[in-house]
Amino acid sequence: MKKYLIVIEKDESGSFGAYSPDLPGCVVVGGSQEETEQLMYDAIAFHLAGLKEEGMPVPDNKSSAEYLLVPEAV
């Protein structure tokens, strides 16, 4: 089992988009964060199955994320 970072972004209309930096082209859009997470899980599984079916290598997880505490501007 592999672990992949996903980035979830909320847009101004209230919908959510997600992508994985380690899986180019693997993107989804959903109506809630929970729906988007589930759609992304399904999309990654589908993406990886397609890579395996085509005999292509499955990418390693190379991305990570951190939050940094930055003082507010005055």
Image (cartoon, grey):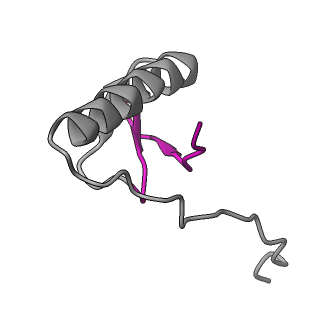
Query: What percent of the width, then of the height, locates residue 31?
Result: 41, 18
- 50 displayed left or right of 46: left
Quadrant containing the C terminus is bottom right
Residue at the bottom extreme?
74
Query: What percent of the width, then of the height, locates residue 16?
Result: 43, 32
Quadrant containing the N terminus is top right
Residue drawn 57% across and 18% down? Answer: 34
Front-lying residue, 19 or 42: 42
Q: Is residue 45 above or below residue 48?
A: above
Residue drawn 40% across and 57% down? Answer: 59
Residue at the left extreme?
54
Query: What percent of the width, then of the height, locates residue 63?
Result: 55, 65
- 26 displayed left or right of 67: left
Residue drawn 52% across and 46% down? Answer: 6
Q: Which residues are magenta?
A: 1-22
Query: What percent of the width, then of the height, locates residue 20?
Result: 43, 50
Residue at the front extreme?
55
Front-lying residue, 17 or 21: 21
Q: Is residue 20 above or below residue 39?
A: below
